[in-house]
């Protein structure tokens, strides 16, 4: 399973998860940074989402809550067949230590959703330390208008 962490997830967190995946016993996934798929002229999220989907990417972990409300980006998520996970807006106000700990805390549940839930879906991960179900924020299907 190929999972991309977008540019709103600090690179140190991406490195932590890459290390866990490289270990093999802790995390069975290929962890990549979305930066690997961004063109030099950075044209927003749609081009890298398309490149990531073409490379076999299936899951997005993002700190950009606005991405899910932009119609063209939601369309790219749907067309790519992605399962995406976003933290609530409170996430952006935490330091990298808290973000790292929180993502590690929620990872077992994220993994359950990746393995057992129908795709594509967009999920909101709470910015808290108590377990609760993720909120389905997939919304209505976006129609391509041209």
Image (spheres, rainbow, N blue to C red):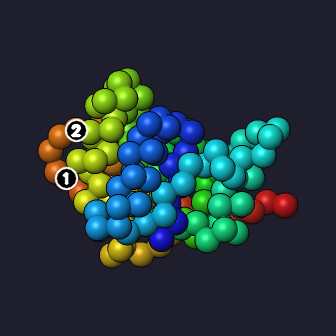
Q: Is residue 18 visible?
A: yes
Residue ranking furthest to the front: 23
Residue ranking furthest to the left: 130
Bin the neighbour count of mark 2 within 10 Å (Cα to Cα): few under 14, some 14-19, many 20 and up.
Answer: some
Which quadrant of the structure image shows residue 25? bottom left
Above-or-below relation of 7 to 119: above
Q: Quadrant of the C terminus?
A: bottom right
Label 1's element? Answer: loop
**Residue under the point 41% across and 60% down:** 22
Q: Is residue 142 visible?
A: no
**Residue under the point 71% across and 60% down:** 51
**Residue under the point 50% across and 37% down:** 11
Left or right side of 16 for 64:
right
**Residue under the point 35% across and 24% down:** 95
Residue that badge 1 annotates: 132
| Residue 128 tag number | 2
Nearest the viewer among 45 and 55 is: 55
Bin the neighbour count of mark 1 within 10 Å (Cα to Cα): few under 14, some 14-19, many 20 and up.
Answer: few
Image coords of residue 35 (percent x, y): 64, 45
Image coords of residue 62 (percent x, y): 49, 46
Left or right side of 34 for 131:
left
Above-or-below relation of 91 to 32: above
Left or right side of 71 for 3:
left
> Is the residue under label 2 in contact with that under label 1 (CB below 8 Å)?
yes
Above-or-below relation of 116 to 58: below
Image coords of residue 70 (percent x, y): 63, 45
Disc 1 from disc 2: Cα separation: 9 Å
Label 2's element? Answer: loop
Image coords of residue 1 (percent x, y): 48, 71
Left or right side of 84 for 111:
left
Nearest the viewer among 34 and 18 is: 18
């Amino acid at each position: 399973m190929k999972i991309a962490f977008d540019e709103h997830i600090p690179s140190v967190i991406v490195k932590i998860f890459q290390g866990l995946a490289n270990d093999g016993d802790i995390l069975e996934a290929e962890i990549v940074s979305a930066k690997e798929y961004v063109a030099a002229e950075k044209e927003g999220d749609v081009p890298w989402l398309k490149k990531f989907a073409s490379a076999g990417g299936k899951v997005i972990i993002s700190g950009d809550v606005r991405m899910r409300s932009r119609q063209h980006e939601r369309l790219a998520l749907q067309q790519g067949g992605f399962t995406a996970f976003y933290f609530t807006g409170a996430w952006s106000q935490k330091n990298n230590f808290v973000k790292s700990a929180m993502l590690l805390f929620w990872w077992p549940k994220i993994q359950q959703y990746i393995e057992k839930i129908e795709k594509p879906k967009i999920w909101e991960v709470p910015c808290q330390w108590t377990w609760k179900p993720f909120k389905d924020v997939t919304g209505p299907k976006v129609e391509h208008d041209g």
